[in-house]
Image: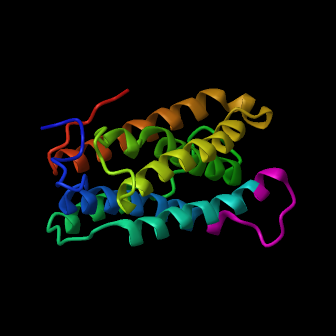
Amino acid sequence: MSEFLGPLDPQGRVPPYQQTRVAAFLTSAHGALARQFAFALPAKLVSAWQTELNAQVYHEAEIVSLLLRATSWVPDLALGYLSMSWETAWFPQPAEGIPDQPQAQAVGLATLAHAVHAGIRPAALLPREANADDPFVMALRRIELESGRLLQAQILFLKGPELLPHRDAVTAALEHRHVEIRRLWTSALEGVGIAFHES
């Protein structure tokens, strides 16, 4: 087990079986976020948060599109059962303890997005000698950079004044999502010889 992707080939590229597993997980997570953000959008935008929601739909879709084209895909027999567990984990989970249902659903989506963007750092898996011009390497670095930007929107919403009366419920939902995402990400990486390392 290693904490980095590899061993790299002579051109400094990540092995295709590792690319496939990492990209499949990220595509599943960001694809689920894109779908849920799209369904959460109202027909007409009436608040700043909804404007940000609209932008996030496209950012998540862009991440999925980038991965689909930048990855050297190979067959991975484990993806059949792994993808089922991943897709089940992304199901909407309204935050418990918040009586307003639309607000509870918004918090549930924001905590999932926060856990994905903060808890999954794909570029940290790249060894120093990885080829900076390789499409997959560039994609992982771009995704991590984009996640940092998207994370700010979730933080602003989850720490906003309208959720102040529900701080304990928000914190509990956030902690639950982070534990869940970390477990799935760890399992996905261990299956291709990567020891998960928390920074």
Q: Which of the colour schemes (rainbow, by chain, secondary structure, one colour) is used?
A: rainbow
Return the residue found at the far right.
Answer: 46
* Residue 182 to residue 33: above or below: above
- Which of 1 and 31 lies nearest the eye of the viewer? 1
9 vs 120, left or right, is left
Residue for point 31% across, 46% down: 185
Q: Quadrant of the C terminus?
A: top left
Is 47 colored magenta in this rendering?
yes
* Residue drawn at point x = 19 percent, y = 42 percent: 194
Where is residue 104? Give x, y as percent. Answer: 64, 47
Judge whether residue 57 is colored magenta.
no
The quadrant of the image that shows the N terminus is top left
Give how far across and how far down residue 119 sits, in percent: 43, 39
**Magenta residues, as a range?**
38-51
* Residue 190 image point, x, y percent: 18, 44
x 24%, y 50%: residue = 188
Please give the count of numbered marks on the rendered protein.
0
Asked whether 123 or 176 is in front, the reply is: 123
* Percent of width and height locating residue 197: 29, 31
Answer with the quarter of the image where residue 18 lies. bottom left
Q: Residue at x 62, y 47 (%)?
A: 150
Q: With respect to residue 197, does 135 lie above or below?
A: below
Q: Is residue 13 above or below residue 164?
A: below
Pick whichever, 33 or 59, lies toward us: 59
